Amino acid sequence: MCVLRIWIGDKMLADSLLFKLFVFPGTVFSLVVVLFLFWWWRKVGAAIQSRYGPKHVGPAGTLQTIADVVKLIAKESIIPEKASRWFWFMPVFSFVLSFLFLSLIPFTDHWVILDFDTSLIMLFAVMAIEPLLIFLVGWASYNKYGLAGAERAGIQMLAYEVFLALTFVPIIMLSHSWSLVGIVYAQGVSPTWATPVAHTFVNRGVWFAVVQPLALLLSVIAVMMAMHIKPFDIPDAEPEVIYGASTEYGGPFYALQMLSHFLMMFLGSGLIVSMFFGGWEGPYLPHVAWFVLKTLTVGTTIMFIQHSMPRLRLSHMMEIAWKKLVPLAFLNIFITLIIMEVLGWV
Amino acid sequence: MAEIEKITATPETLVDTALGLKKAGFTFLEFMSAVDYVPKNKVEPGANRIDAVYMLWNPGTNEQKMITVPLPRDNPVVPTVMPVWEGANWHEREAHELFGIDIKGHPNLSHLLLAEGWNDTYPLRKDFKVEEVEIDWNAPTSKLAEGEPERVYHFAVQHPGAHGPMGFDLLLDGNRILDAESRIGYVHRTLEKLGEQRNYYQNILNMERGCIMCGMPYIEVWARAVEELLGIEVPEKAKYLRLIAVELNRLSSHLIWMGPQQGGDFSYMPVAMWAMGDREKVLDLLEALTGGRITFAYIRPGGVRWDIPERFREMAEKNLRYLESRIPVYEEMMFKEPIVKERLTGLGKLTPQEAIDIGASGPVLRATGVAHDTRKDAHIPIYEDLGFQIVTQTAGDAWARGMVRLGEMKESIRLILDALDRLPPGNSEADLFNRKAMPWMKVPVGETYAVTESCRGRLGIHLISDGTNTPYRTKIRGPSFSNMYAVEHILKKGSYLYDIPVLIGSMDVCPADMDR
């Protein structure tokens, strides 16, 4: 740990932005998490489907992901003849984008790269770029199934963005904050806001998962839709559109995509933890450990859903999203409003 | 079913004859094909003609009739019977490319099983020479692609949702299918021609390759066809063992269907993996009984290859009881799961009339409420003694097809266990000829048509013998051929891209069985 105590100017190295960007919670840590998560995802899937999963490379197959990534990077990156020159752009930029997402997620109130009053809006903006990228790339790869998958990604984005935003409204109302760090504070007893704020929900030591179960449900669904996780992996449904927008991407491009997919999966779970499960708050263990543990628990739950569900039909997904989930999100706002009015919370 | 009832017609009277027969109840066209008689043939020496053959089945009375239309070999022309039986479409295209019979009035006579640029050589004619074949590899692949190739989606072969080497060219508007054209024939091995070049014994292996998922019914029906020509009666015990082998194979095939095929269509991996895992139990039984897990060569003319092994009864009891306990699990996971139910209900709906017109059979036909199972209709030995029940559903959609297959699995388990209980003593093979002399076994001149219910539907073999040790003509009616035509028929009525894999899956189309 002595590395962390190196001083740069008037700051410790561990406090510098550079360290946060490249070591923790930035590049190095997230790569380790992704490699672990990929292995864990396979093992969970294998357990559900009564298989073994990876078991030969490393102890219990833990190094399988590294072997796979090395293999994929060693492969030739094939670019279709008629593809646009922006072909390489998507995997690289979506990797960058997932790091942008990472920088907004508070591991603790200290270990957060970017935190400002309106980070939730920034988060929506980042989440909305991804499907646009996918659409761009579906067109750029000059593949019919790529385009079909891109269309689906667009349709799905329209379906989830609306109720994702609506789902977060009650949380913002209750926590009086547009920042993720503020939302975590609102759920716990933190040194900064030591006592419950009068006439609000804030700082009562109650998780939003308890008071907003409907919002939790909706946001888990929305995150799964955003990350293209089964049963919402319609944009890259193999039996229908091969691999959707990413059909033409192989080798290193594919590796990049898979890594960013798993990073996003981790961060999506992290977002849910921050919003509903009190973020880093917890007794005995260090704060970072609590955050990672909670995130992995939520992530594993999502994996359980993913591995035990069939895929929805495109039209069925739209029906569910527009006819059921959007009204539910509105309903949740109204219920929250009424409760806040009754309890006298402002 | 000894002698086939033949009706001779001319090209002029064919359609009238067909209409008359259809009115008389022969609503089901099993296949349309041909037999090539060159002058030096030994069936009818001196005959120089091609017989167009229409095999009909009367679902009401279970009668079998055959229309033959003798045609000159140099310019065979018959009118299309598509107005009478819609399912004749692909059969006529097949006869056109394999026998060179010109079908007057057919809407689309492009190549179906052979490559698009195949020249005017006809593989199933007796004077066919491989050296004469020339293929123009630049020939357009489909009529759809001629207009706007950019709009045509090739949902075929390499596509993960195409269920093997087959598929469609699709004209799409967003996700909606405007037009579809089947692309099949990628695994066409001219199994029928191969059958004519091998002796009756080698043909056991040949026929088994008809469908790799469900080979046992193929050899069962082959053995029965040959036995009919030879006039042998197999021992009672062999009949029981055949039933056990066929039903075990049906179980394994239906488990593949439920898991990787139908479950895989919506990436339902738990069911896919569990079904494949449970299939191992069936394969273990098949291995114990026949020695093989996928291809068996177990049933042969005269009986079965080996007798039942010791302790097979206990093993079967254990494995099949386990499987029986799993069926409610699958029902819960697959057919009562809301997402799956939503995807399957109402998809690919066929009315009983449509299904019979197309020639669809097996679970596809029974899901429409038509209680026809060839095991019962054709009086296949033992089934009726064991009180075989036909499983039907009425909805006619993909969900109903699945439920029929699930019910058939239950029925198969019951049949196998009952058959094992009642297994008579005695020989498992008729003591008629020397085993080692089987390759030289000559079969008297004759013609027969044997049918059975394969895992996918009505499977038939039309066998003509010329008195030597190789058959003169073996026509295979693969059930998937007609069932795949039903898929095209449904797609043309209007469907969506995301429904195609599920639709093919629900028909349980086996490409090898379809292309032969």
Image (cartoon, coloured by chain):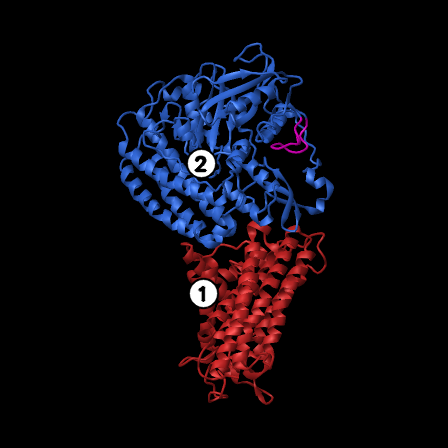
Chain colours: A red, B blue
> Decide: marks 2, 1 in contact (CB < 8 A)?
no
In this rendering, does residue B86 appear at all? yes
In magenta stretch: residue B116 = yes
- Helix, strand or loop at mark 2: loop
* Residue B230 coordinates in the image, percent (x, y): 41, 17
Q: Amino acid at mark 2?
A: Cys
Cα gap from disc 2 to disc 1, whole angstroms:
39 Å
Q: Chain letter for mark 2, please.
A: B
The structure residue drawn at horizontal position 59% and vertical position 35%, both measured from the top left corner, is: B185
Disc 2 residue crowd, few under 14, some 14–19, many 20+, Cα 10 Å: many
Instruction: Tell me: residue A302, above or below residue B353.
Output: below
Labels 2 and 1 share a subunit: no
Task: For the N terminus of chain B, give its image quadrant.
Answer: top left
Q: Is residue A184 left or right of residue B243?
A: right
Q: Which mark is residue B455?
A: 2
Q: Amino acid at mark 1?
A: Thr
Give whichever of B200, B506 is nearer the camera: B506
Q: Nearer the viewer, residue B153 or B6?
A: B6
Instruction: Answer whether residue B496 is magenta in the image.
Output: no
Query: Disc number at residue B217?
Result: none
Magenta stretch, overall SS: loop
Q: Chain of mark 1?
A: A
Q: Vertical placement of B150 versus A172: above or below? A: above
- Residue at 34% of width from left, 29% of height from top? B384
Q: Left of A191 or right of it: where is A13?
A: right
Label count reads 2
Task: Report the residue at 60% width, 20% height from top.
Answer: B16
Picture coordinates of residue B72 (x, y %)?
A: 64, 15
Q: Which residue is mark 1?
A: A301
Question: Residues in magenta?
Answer: B105-119
Residue B375: x %, y % from top left: 40, 30
Outermost residue, top direction?
Answer: B46
